[in-house]
Image (cartoon, helix red, strand yellow):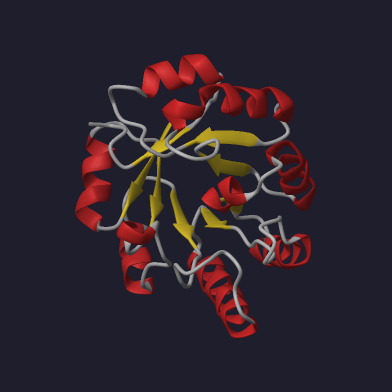
Amino acid sequence: MYEVCVSSISQIQDAISRGAHRVELCANLDVGGLTPPLFLVEEALTLKIPVNVIVRVHSDSFTPSTAQFTLMKEQITQLKQLGVNGVVFGVLTPENKIDAVKNKELVKLAGKMRKTFHMAFDQVENKSEALETVIKLGFDTVLTRGGRGNAADNVQLIKELVTQAKGRICVMPGGGITAENRDYIQEETGAEWMHGTKIMQ
């Protein structure tokens, strides 16, 4: 199953034509993705593919200020009203640990939408512990490159996370995955879903 990271309607249409199963809609992919404008989300929802939307209000860190966290909540509420398939977010403490309090609030706010913890996960040192926290918080998916580098560099750790998850959460490899290496990464990790910008090319 392939999720393609996109930032425009033409990219979504191309992903659909190549057989993608879902898209993650972002703005500013050059900084890892930020929340896209609502008009783009609305247009994306007219196309025949599930749309997950990133909720990230700045690229400086994964630790939002009070005002930035309020904005994240407002964006999730707006996306829920629009009827998107899922939201993609992740909040860390200043010590680069999973912020259980803030993430729990966002998960509750998201309600029935699918919830993916994004690559902020890779900033956490103890990924086994972090995975258990993310599962307890109620996320459906965790997107990870397995640490530094790209997913292809970290297939062993990703495999360990998939094994640890035992179906309780979807561990989705991302980061540097292309049409050329996707089969290798899937076979080595046992992951069900794969994520990338060039994964269908």
Residue 34: where, in percent of width, then height? 41, 65
**Which residue is nearer to you in this view: 115 or 199?**
199
- The residue at the far bottom in this view is 67
**Which residue is nearer to you in this view: 157 or 42?**
157
**Which residue is nearer to you in this view: 53 or 44?**
53
Q: Residue at x 48, y 72 (%)?
A: 57
**Which residue is nearer to you in this view: 61 or 73?**
61
Q: Is residue 16 above or below residue 184?
A: below
Q: Is residue 98 left or right of residue 136?
A: left
Which of the 4 image quarters holds residue 4? top left
Residue 72: where, in percent of width, then height? 57, 73
Which of the 4 image quarters holds residue 70? bottom right
| Quarter of the figure that contains the C terminus | top left
Which of the 4 image quarters holds residue 3? top left
Q: Residue at x 53, y 35 (%)?
A: 172
Q: Is residue 126 left or right of residue 201?
A: right
Q: Residue at x 51, y 15 (%)?
A: 188
| Quarter of the figure that contains the N terminus | top left
Q: Is residue 100 above or below residue 170?
A: below
Q: Is residue 28 left or right of residue 154?
A: left
Q: Residue at x 21, y 42 (%)?
A: 14
Residue 117: where, in percent of width, then height? 60, 50
